[in-house]
């Protein structure tokens, strides 16, 4: 990615090749033709769109309808910051040492990227529920583990996060919550877990009504250890460890107050979930997929 972002034309070719810049768009003025790309050395991007109709000739930036549309950074700068520094969890101060860019611009771009990944993650989660209805007690690979954990390192905030882990698919979900009461946690469980599915939890009182809601609820008694065999919540406990490491390493800044700040913290959590889901994958390719889904 460093080599790709050292030259404008190479960056441009990579962006077009990955669908992050559009090759044509419908003319916003006449709506009767697609704008075509033409050279324009007076522009920083050295290209522009123009309507081919002689009675229109509308021009537009090649960034129209893309992730770059509202940015004043060069395409090389934007691409390097997002696809190299952000994906490699490089802190803002290191970026500023290597690029002559305002610190607020870097912070805003990091925050914007987290927000877009969070939007993608949440959109996927809305499409289906996790967990399976278990007919046989010996189906040890099935079930959803749930737990809550205190995160205290994101911008100095102390927030509770509620998590779920599907044993069969290894999918994890995590939500910043105002508190750990049944009024908050039960609706999240109902929204995310298949009705009637098996759920493993500790003995936290907020979970006591899960059986009343139709779930096959199994309680792991942590007072005598963390469980054994399949009768455990070790998987979600492991997720907390990895998620805290990833969100701490991101060194992100969360601005705002109340609900706005909680939303920013949720973005950090969702990016951590996204990184875990794509562990071992080419993150640049996965992020291209995210942006293409959002802007395609």
Image (cartoon, rainbow, N blue to C red):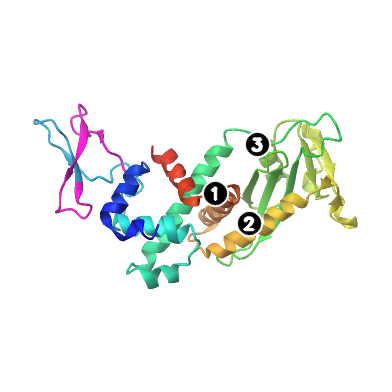
* Marks 2/1: CA–CA distance: 17 Å
Q: Horizontal placement of 141 versus 51: left or right?
A: right
Q: Which of the two discs, 2 and 1, labels the residue nearer the N terminus?
A: 2
Which residues fall within the magenta stretch? 21-47
At which x and y percent is residue 268? 54, 55
- Quarter of the figure with the N terminus: bottom left
The residue tagged 1 is: 281
Q: Position of residue 223 (x, y in %)?
A: 88, 57
Measure the C-alpha gap from mark 3 to mark 2.
22 Å
Dividing the picture into quadrants, the one containing residue 247 is bottom right
Q: Which mark is residue 243?
A: 2
Q: Nearer the viewer, residue 81 or 196?
A: 81
95 on left or right of 44: right
| Gap between marks 1 and 3 measured at Cα | 29 Å
Numbered badge on residue 191: 3
Q: Is residue 148 above or below residue 59?
A: below
> SS for tag 2?
helix
Residue 186 in which image quadrant: top right
Q: Secondary structure at mark 3?
A: helix
- The secondary structure that most of the magenta stretch takes on is loop
Residue 120: give x, y in percent of width and height: 50, 43
Q: Which mark is residue 230?
A: none
Name the residue: 49% across, 48% down.
117
Residue extending farthest to the right is: 224
Decide: is 164 above or below 251: above
């Amino acid at each position: 990615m460093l080599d790709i972002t050292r030259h404008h034309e190479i960056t441009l070719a990579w962006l077009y090749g990955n669908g992050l810049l559009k090759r044509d768009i419908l003319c916003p003025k006449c709506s009767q033709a697609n704008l075509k790309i033409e050279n324009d050395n007076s522009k920083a991007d050295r290209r522009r769109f123009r309507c081919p109709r002689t009675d229109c000739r509308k021009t537009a930036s090649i960034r129209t309808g893309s992730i770059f549309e509202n940015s004043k950074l060069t395409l090389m700068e934007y691409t390097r910051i997002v696809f190299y520094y952000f994906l490699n969890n490089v802190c803002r101060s290191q970026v500023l040492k290597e690029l002559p860019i305002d610190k607020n611009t870097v912070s805003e771009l990091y925050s914007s990227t987290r927000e877009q990944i969070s939007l993608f993650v949440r959109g996927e989660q809305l499409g289906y529920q996790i967990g399976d209805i278990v007919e046989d007690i010996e189906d040890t690979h099935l079930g959803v583990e749930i737990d809550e954990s205190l995160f205290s390192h994101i911008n100095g905030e102390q927030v509770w996060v509620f998590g779920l882990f599907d044993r069969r698919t290894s999918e994890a979900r995590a939500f910043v919550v105002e508190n750990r009461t049944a009024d908050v946690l039960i609706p999240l469980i109902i929204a995310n877990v298949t009705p009637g599915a098996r759920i493993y939890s500790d003995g936290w009182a907020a979970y006591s009504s899960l059986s009343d809601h139709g779930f096959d609820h199994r309680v792991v008694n942590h007072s005598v250890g963390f469980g054994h065999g399949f009768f455990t919540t070790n998987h979600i406990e492991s997720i907390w460890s990895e998620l805290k490491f990833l969100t701490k390493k991101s060194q992100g800044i969360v601005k705002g107050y109340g609900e706005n700040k909680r939303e920013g913290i949720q973005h950090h959590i969702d990016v951590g979930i996204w990184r875990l889901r794509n562990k071992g994958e080419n993150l640049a390719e996965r992020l291209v997929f995210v942006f293409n889904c959002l802007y395609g």
